[in-house]
Image (spheres, rainbow, N blue to C red):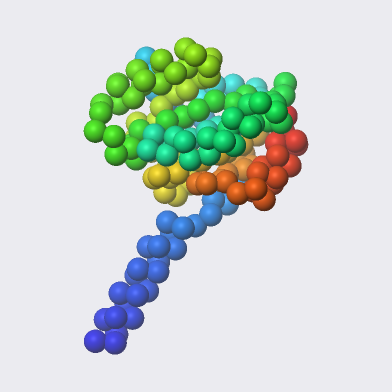
Amino acid sequence: MKKMFFTLAVALFMVCGVNAQDVKVPHKVSNLTLIDLEGAEVQIPNWGKKNLLIFYVDPDESNQNHEFTVEMEENHKAAGDNIYGFGIINLKDSWYPVPDSMVRKMARKRTEKNGAYIITDPDRRLAEAWDLGTCNNKFVLMIVSKQGELVYCHKGEISEAEKQNFYKVVQKYR
């Protein structure tokens, strides 16, 4: 009985440990084909031309870092000639009982107002290819260098200390 409990405990620890793992940065990542808001295949924009600031968002948690993203827009601390920011909707992890096409339609309406560029990831292609681990219920903030390296990645609610760390990294790439 003790052996079975120990085996179960080790297995549970391994599963939880894998899901809780931080993303190792920097590491090389590649351009991918995702889906735009019209349903067409597209490559990640400005790949190799600019450093990329990517908001990879589970629609269930789109407001997770709302104040931070508004602050970032207003103070322009993440803006610069060498950085391009855009959003990717993580459709696969959404619990919304609506078709992907409906989520894309809602996103199109929103982008008409703010001019943001948004594409979608219908099948966790980006999370898997870039070794991000679980992104379910997470607002993921990433920076990818022109050289194709993931140099920053934060998943979930962002603390004040992590905001400062993020801005330090952005300074190098803007």
Place of residue 154 in the rendered image (x, y in percent of width and height, measured from the top left)? 56, 46
Image location of residue 79, percent across then percent down:
69, 26
Q: Quadrant of the C terminus?
A: top right
In which image quadrant can residue 145 be found?
top right
| Near-viewer residue (70 or 30) | 70
Quarter of the image for residue 18 reads bottom left
Q: Position of residue 148 (x, y in %)?
A: 61, 34
User: How many circles with numbers are drawn on the protein?
Assistant: 0
Q: Which residue is farthest bottom?
A: 2
Q: Residue at x 58, y 32 (%)?
A: 69
| Residue ID at (39%, 34%) | 59
Residue pictured at 54% horizontal, 25% vertical: 86
Is 37 located above or below residue 73 in the figure? above
Q: Observer-nearest residue: 25 or 167? A: 167
Taking the image as shown, residue 115 lies to the left or right of residue 165, namely: left
Q: Quadrant of the N terminus?
A: bottom left
Residue 159 horizontal/vertical position (percent): 60, 49
- Whether 145 is drawn above or below 154: the answer is above
Residue closer to the observer: 33 or 70: 70
Q: Is any part of residue 49 visible from this angle?
A: yes
For this orientation, the residue located farthest to the top is 112
Q: Residue at x 32, y 77 (%)?
A: 7
User: Does residue 27 appear anywhere in the picture?
Assistant: no
* Position above or below: 78 against 38: below
